[in-house]
Amino acid sequence: MDTVLQIFGLLVLILLSAFFSISEISLAASKKMRLQALAEEGDSRAREVIALKAKPGAMFSIVEIGVNALALAGGILGQAAFIPPFTRLYSMVASPEATHTLAFWSAYLLATLLFVLFADLIPRRMAMAIPESCAVLIVRPISWLNQVLRPIVWFLNTITTQVMKRTGLPIHANDHVTTADVMATVNAGVREGLIDPTERSVIENIFSLEDRTAGTVMTDREDIVYFLRSDSDESIRRKLAEHPHHQFLVCDKTLDNVVGYIDSKQLLRYLVEDKKLDLGEKGILSPVKLIPETLSMSEVIEVIRNTSADFVVVINEYGEVAGLITLNDVMNTVMGEMVGMDEDSQIIQRDESSWLVEGSTPIYDLQNYFDLDQIEDNPPYETAGGLIMYLLRRIPKRADKVLFNGYRFEVMDIDKNRVDQLLVTKLPAVKPAAEAQAAPADQPKTNG
């Protein structure tokens, strides 16, 4: 009967030790964001877990007291429960001295195996699989033990804190969620098929807004359609018919002297009423918001939101108009390929290993699309055309070729000394010797 009670007591100790193992892992592995979601759903225990994780010293002291005390008690009780049966078993085949030694080590190994399996490995793996669910179940018993064992916990926690401070070890966990943490979760969701790759692209674009400047997104000044305040009625009508935009900049003599903008609806009203269009008329123009080229895209979006503007004009450091950014530009930057149509795309795939790329493609988009890891941070160029000019160290010409990061960039078209279109071809993993010999002698030496 004593052996039965001892085995029953050992099982109780295993269950208690399993409780502490679950407590330790679940409280450490539970995510603050998931706990906050449970708290918002009305689970008050989740708030208690968050508060306990903020000051985990007491919790770990209780867990260590429980685990070590139960392990010692389990070892003593396990030997008392298992040595007699093993002694009777081995006495039939071994000498008394060997019987005692074999019974001792067999009882030790069996008790250890039971604790390792049922008080350690299985509970810990369960707690790692569902940490938040386990944490809300054990938080109140742990809090109760904290009240009961407060003097012992305070003593151990004080000593631990002092030792960690004096040795320079961190005392509090860093719960700040970084961009890398979010993207790691998103990438895991893509691998599991829970998140579409295009949705991941949108998330990446949102996080990149702080790093992208206005100059990488704007419509260049060469592509801006604008009116001069002195334009004739006939000139305004002709330009309006050729370029059906929603708003038009109005400038005085040159593009760099922006005086306002006019809405196409207002122009349409003049046309319907068959009135003469005079952009010099008082009150006909609306004010334009000017922003510096160095603003990040997140700051640009904030400006647009605060001013309720449909577009902003980008000014460079010399006070000249560098371009403009519309709401459509912002949408394309954030949504990317989810809203972009193939015919409007700046990067068009021709076949499995070649693409047509506009020279005005922002270098950030080029880098992400082709995974160009050799592009430095804050490079001295902003577009694909700027990259080619930087690598050539001269003004590009048609048919110029550059090898870079495993791709061949070939200039297909030039417009006023500006690269208009590129042909990008992915090079084979091992470059054939014949192609290496055929490379032009004046080709810049870049990493291919």
Image (tube, rainbow, N blue to C red):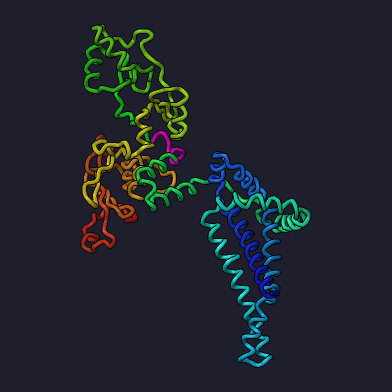
Q: Is residue 379 above or below residue 276?
A: below
Please state the total of marks drawn on the protein image. Answer: 0
Q: Is residue 357 magenta?
A: no
Residue visible at 37% across and 43% down in the picture: 199
Q: Is residue 284 above or below residue 144?
A: above
Residue visible at 22% across and 19% down in the picture: 241
Which quadrant holds residue 416?
A: top left
Identify the image quadrant of the N terminus.
bottom right
Residue visible at 42% across and 26% down in the picture: 319
Which quadrant holds residue 205?
A: top left
Where residue 270 sits in the image (x, y, percent)? 27, 9
Identify the image quadrant of the C terminus.
bottom left
Q: Which residues are magenta?
A: 207-215
Which one is in front, 65 or 19? 19
Q: Is residue 208 magenta?
A: yes
Report the side of 133 relative to 245 (left or right).
right
Q: Is residue 202 above or below residue 56?
A: above
Which one is in front, 216 or 255? 216
Where residue 356 sits in the image (x, y, percent)? 24, 44
Where residue 44 sits in the image (x, y, percent)? 61, 42
Residue visible at 72% across and 52% down in the picture: 146
Identify the residue at the far front of this view: 1
Report the side of 69 relative to 349 (left or right).
right
Where residue 285 sits in the image (x, y, percent)? 37, 13
